[in-house]
Image (spheres, rainbow, N blue to C red):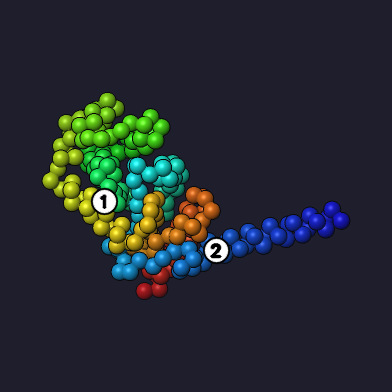
């Protein structure tokens, strides 16, 4: 009897594994992703994955270490880009400016995770641009260089463009992942962040196959 139970359990687990593999290999529109129409602009030579996020989002904070590790191992034909969004909230628009300014000054790699930690663990309130500049300088970055980047004429348009892309992709919340400008992943199709990234991998495969079929 014990052997029979063990065999039945093994069969069930095998079936579940095959089902999961099938789900990952064959993502379905409406269930696993929503088509983005018209598609977002995307590189011709790369399959681009976009993460729409905000430093102010608790879920983005939790997801950040995982997606950072995932992005570091992407194949050569895949690129990764992050787009901060504000949902027309002034406080989140300032957080978008922090991301773009850090990117412009070359301090993003050093302070990206630190911004999440400051907001979600240390409860730092970035209520003004001055408070942001002061915090960045306290972390060893060039405060004047960062302030100039935040005050740049192009900053407002960059923040606005990120929000426009999010609207065009019809995202309802963050984090949200778009693949090849055409597929918006349905977060509810994944039970956790690891499954979300596996679904992203499956959609990269789908995008690659569609590109080869052109």
Give 115 or 66, whichever is nearer the viewer: 115
Quadrant containing the N terminus in the rendered view: bottom right
Decide which of tag 2 and tag 1 comes sooner along the chain: 2
Outermost residue, right side: 1
Please tell me which residue is depicted at 41% across the width and 32% down the height of the picture.
121
Q: Residue 122 appears at what percent x and percent y?
A: 38, 29
Q: Is residue 26 left or right of residue 44?
A: right
Q: Residue 105 appears at what percent x and percent y?
A: 22, 38
Q: Secondary structure at mark 2?
A: helix
Q: Is residue 7 left or right of residue 69?
A: right
Residue 6 sits in quarter? bottom right
Pointer 2 residue: 23
Residue 141 sits in quarter? top left
Please tell me which residue is depicted at 71% across the width and 60% down the height of the picture.
12
Residue 79 visible in the picture? no
Dot in front, 2 or 1: 1
Residue 79 sits in quarter? bottom left
Give 101 or 210, whichever is nearer the viewer: 101
Question: Dot 2, crowdedness within 10 Å: few (<14), some or many (≥20)?
Answer: some
What's the CA distance linking mark 2 and mark 1? Answer: 35 Å
Which label was assigned to residue 88?
A: 1
Give 67 or 209, whichever is nearer the viewer: 67
Q: Is residue 45 above or below residue 126?
A: below
Please tell me which residue is depicted at 29% across the width and 59% down the height of the picture.
167
Outermost residue, bottom side: 214
Q: Residue 137 appears at what percent x and percent y?
A: 24, 28
Which label was assigned to residue 169?
A: none
Question: Dot 1, crowdedness within 10 Å: few (<14), some or many (≥20)?
Answer: few
Q: Secondary structure at mark 1?
A: loop
Q: Residue 131 appears at what percent x and percent y?
A: 24, 31
Q: Is residue 83 above or below residue 185?
A: above
Residue 17 visible in the picture? yes
């Amino acid at each position: 009897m014990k052997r029979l139970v063990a065999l039945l359990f093994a069969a069930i687990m095998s079936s579940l594994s095959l089902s999961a593999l099938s789900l990952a290999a064959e993502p379905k529109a409406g269930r696993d992703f929503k088509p983005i129409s018209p598609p977002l602009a995307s590189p011709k030579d790369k399959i681009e994955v976009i993460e729409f996020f905000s430093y102010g989002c608790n879920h983005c904070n939790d997801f950040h270490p995982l997606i950072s590790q995932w992005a570091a191992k992407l194949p050569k034909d895949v690129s990764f880009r992050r787009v901060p969004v504000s949902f027309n909230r002034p406080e989140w628009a300032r957080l978008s400016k922090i991301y773009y300014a850090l990117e412009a000054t070359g301090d993003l790699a050093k302070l990206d995770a630190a911004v999440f930690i400051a907001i979600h663990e240390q409860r730092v309130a970035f209520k003004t641009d001055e408070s942001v500049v002061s915090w960045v300088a306290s972390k060893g970055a060039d405060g004047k260089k960062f302030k100039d980047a935040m005050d740049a004429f192009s900053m407002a348009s960059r923040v606005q463009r990120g929000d426009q892309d999010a609207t065009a992709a019809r995202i309802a919340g963050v984090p949200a992942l778009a693949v090849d400008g055409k597929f918006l992943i349905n977060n509810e199709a994944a039970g956790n962040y690891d499954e979300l990234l596996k679904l992203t991998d499956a959609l990269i495969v789908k995008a690659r196959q569609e590109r080869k079929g052109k």
